[in-house]
Image (tube, rainbow, N blue to C red):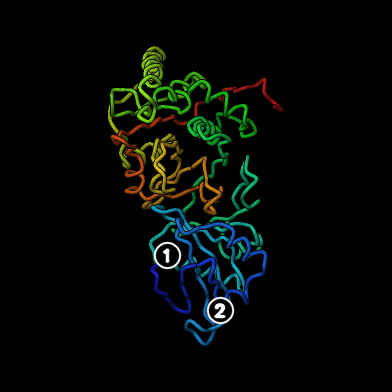
Amino acid sequence: MPSSQQEASVGRVVVPFEREAVPTALRRLAHHEVLERWQAVDRTAHGVHLVAVAGDGGGDDADWTGAALVTARPHTAYLKIVDALGDVQAAVAAVVGHARERGLVQVKWEGWTARSEDAADAGFTVLRPPATDNTGPASAYVRWLHAGETVPEPPYYGQTTHFSCGAVTALVAQAHAGTLPVESLDRRAELTLWREATNFPSCEPVGLGVAVRRTWPSSSVTVHLDVDRPVLLDHFPETEQEWRAHLQRMSRADAARIGVPVEPHRLLPAGIRGAVGRREQVLLLISLAGMQGFDVPHWVLCHGIVPGAVVVEDPWHGTATGDTWVDAHLLPVPDESLDTMAAVPPDHFHGAVLIGARPAARTAFLSDSAGA
């Protein structure tokens, strides 16, 4: 997040963005509808700031030749351009330089006003559009900042309920592996798998691992859970905890019966990197406190690695803060940040489900739901 004071580097100006105090230099560059979108939501929790290119005069009072509104989730390793204005190429180059100076690994660019040719000229590649999302931009672009760095791109599917993140991460993992046809990613598939895995309403690690193995019997599944007790129940009254705890004990018995190992230790960042390097995929239980500011358990998919960060798919984003599918897709999280997020309160337990590399044969899933 930028400091409250302006910083400049080779004509680059970085200042906080305040919705009620838009700089005159910016008003000269921005169309009304762009400023209206920038001012429509409070992005301060995501470090919102302006990266501008100063004119020949330099300094605060100079006319800017280009500018970009930039945000990012806290404790991550990317920047997101919401829009670039004026001299677009210069503005985007300034953001890329700003990201490099901060040691980040990625810049994304939302497609509200971006032209595909401008994105290509700036070294960005197009992202595949989400399977379900009507709130964010229809298109977006990404540029990795390490030379030669590429990360295979899974399909992006946003969960359609507040409680089906575990099911969605498993479905996206199988679609990314080629085990599940991408066109099968729909609400019926989401709720069908959630119904198999749920502990009402959340999905706890053992139940999720069992549901994945039952749905795709040829997939290798391993659960990591470093406590030997029911989890994700503390917010329920005692009478509501008892029967959910019984369901979790049933899931443990099911895991033993169908051959899903439950490893009684946490999966460290090195273990996540090793698994992804072997083309395994990791469904990781985290707390959203670091990235979103509220302490809610949540499942994400770890599927890629780059120097200094693990790349995840997050099936949830918060439109109230300007967070879109572009933030949640191909999201790089530093190892240390991910390790902190993976300690789930109140007692900081750790849970994960590993899905092995793609099996030789594709397993059919919900074949009778085509066209649903």
- Pointer 1 or 2: first along the chain: 2
The amino acid beneath tag 1 is Arg
Q: Which of 134 and 169 is in front in this view?
A: 134
Which residue is under mark 1?
100
- Residue 38 at what x, y percent from top left? 58, 62
Q: Is residue 204 visible?
A: yes
Q: Kindly check if marks 1 and 2 are in contact, taking CB atoms under 8 A apart as contact.
A: no
Q: Which residue is drawn at 63% across and 46% down?
A: 129
User: Which of the 4 image quarters holds residue 45?
Assistant: bottom left
Q: Is residue 346 left or right of residue 12?
A: left
The amino acid beneath tag 2 is Trp
How dense is the environment of label 1, judged by Cα within 10 Å: few (below 14), some, or many (20 and up)? Answer: some
Q: Residue at x 45, y 38 (%)?
A: 300
- Residue 328 at what x, y percent from top left? 51, 47
User: If the image is split into quadrants, where does the C terminus sit?
Assistant: top right
Circle 2 — which element? strand
Instruction: Judge whether 150 appears above or below 266 on screen.
Output: below
User: If the image is split into quadrants, where does the N terminus sit?
Assistant: bottom left
Q: Nearer the viewer, residue 358 or 228?
A: 228
Instruction: Judge whether 98 appears above or below 298 on screen.
Output: below
User: Which of the 4 image quarters holds residue 25?
Assistant: bottom right
Q: Residue at x 63, y 40 (%)?
A: 132
Q: Is residue 310 left or right of residue 127?
A: left
- Residue 214 at what x, y percent from top left? 49, 18
Q: Is residue 255 visible?
A: no
Which residue is under mark 2?
64
Distance from disc 1 to disc 2, alpha carbons, whole Å, reads: 22 Å
Q: Which mark is residue 61?
A: none
1 vs 2, front mark: 2
Q: Nearer the viewer, residue 323 or 304?
A: 323
- Residue 94 at what x, y percent from top left? 50, 70
